[in-house]
Amino acid sequence: MTQIAPNRLTALDVVLGGLMRRYKERVPDVGAIIDTMINAGIIEDAGAIENDHIAFRTMGVPNLGIASLERLFLHYGYEKRDYYNFPAKKLDAFWYAPPAPRYPRIFISELRVHELSAEAQRLVYAYTNEVSADPVDQLDLDDGAAVDAFLHAPLWRTPTWDDYRQLQAESEYAAWVIYNRYYLNHFTVSVHNLPDGYNTIEQFNAFLEAHGFKLNDSGGKAKQSPDGNLIQSSTVAEMVDAEFADGHGGSTVQRISGSYVEFAERRVLADYADLPEDVVTRAHRREGFEAGNADKIFESTYSSQTAKR
């Protein structure tokens, strides 16, 4: 792990705390799932959950995208790792390893805007061109409160409902980002650290569905890597009331896809299969991500899934 100055980790704590606080406020499934786990005796409190990773969506345009957002987390000691390509969704992505095991991994994706139709590009740039310089240049990255505020501040004006719908018809990812900006897309429960009976995706999915939670079934409710060692699932994103500009100086409130909750099972690698369970750490489990899994997880916010809520 990278050695990082204590003040930077303090700032990171503030940033992650702010992200999770607002995320929980906007995604009732988070609190509902945690409460259901507590009531079932799976955990004593929310602090018993290991957050496997958090994810952000961005636009691949000048002054924004991965190149800008990753600067925040690189400053806090995160290390850039593998690249992923999603051809059909026109996305690039990287994941970032944390400066200490207590922190979540980070997954940042970016829309290849230049691959959209000319009209969709025009719509995206009509908003993102309002950002004329990399906004991270203006931040004191050691001021966690300032970074937290930035991640929850609008980067461009509120989109119109017509523009949102037009983008959504071509790229649901583009529509999600044009409204939500850097809003936290999801956090992830590490199910392999839960007690026996709940510590596999198969078991935990059954628990969730028994309590009425809707799961993303694109590619199957459990998405598994070819090596069999990374299994993921997710809820269907909750619909939220969103205020849009109406194009005539007023506003309109519409129901759109918000954020969701993900679940991950990272199995112990074959080299460590004989280790006692109580000594197994992150280092002994499958690391990284899987493009095939992530491709389907992205669809947790897509209308094909949210229509099932």
Image: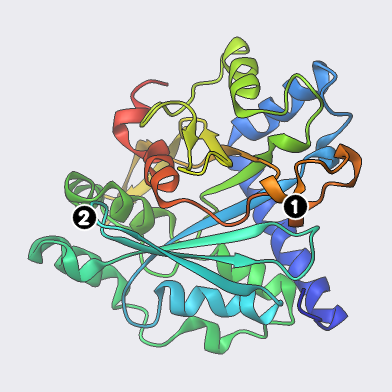
Residue 229: image x %, image y %? Answer: 58, 42
Label 1 environment density (alpha carbons within 10 Å; few <14, some 14–19, many ≥20): some
What is the secondary structure assignment of the residue under circle 2? loop
Q: Which quadrant does the N terminus fall into?
A: bottom right
Q: Position of residue 239 (x, y in %)?
A: 44, 33
Residue occupying the point 83% across, 72% down? 10
The answer to whether residue 264 is visible is: yes
Of residue 65 and residue 103, the one placed in the foreground of this image is 103
Amino acid on which the number 2 mark rests in the picture: Gly
Give the image quarter of residue 18.
Answer: bottom right
**Residue that mark 1 sits on:** 284
| Image: 304 above or below 243 | above
Q: Are marks 2 and 1 in contact (CB under 8 Å)?
A: no
User: How many labels, in total?
Assistant: 2
Answer with mark 2 or mark 1, whichever residue precedes in sequence: 2
31 left or right, relative to 177: right
Residue in the picture at 74% in, 79% down: 143
Q: Quadrant of residue 140?
A: bottom right
Question: In the rendered view, does 120 fall on the left or right side of 217?
Answer: left
Residue 199 vs 85, above or below: the answer is: above
Nearer the observer, 130 or 109: 109
Q: Is residue 222 left or right of residue 167?
A: right
Q: Amino acid at mark 1?
A: His
Q: Quadrant of residue 300?
A: top left
- Which mark identifies residue 247? 2
Q: Under tag 1, what secondary structure?
A: helix
Residue at the outermost left position: 118
Q: State the image coordinates of residue 254 (x, y, percent, origin top left).
A: 34, 37
Q: CA distance from mark 2 to mark 1?
A: 54 Å
Q: Is residue 69 above or below residue 169?
A: below
Of the residues tagged 2 and 1, which is closer to the observer? Answer: 1
Relative image position of residue 83 (x, y in whole percent): 44, 67
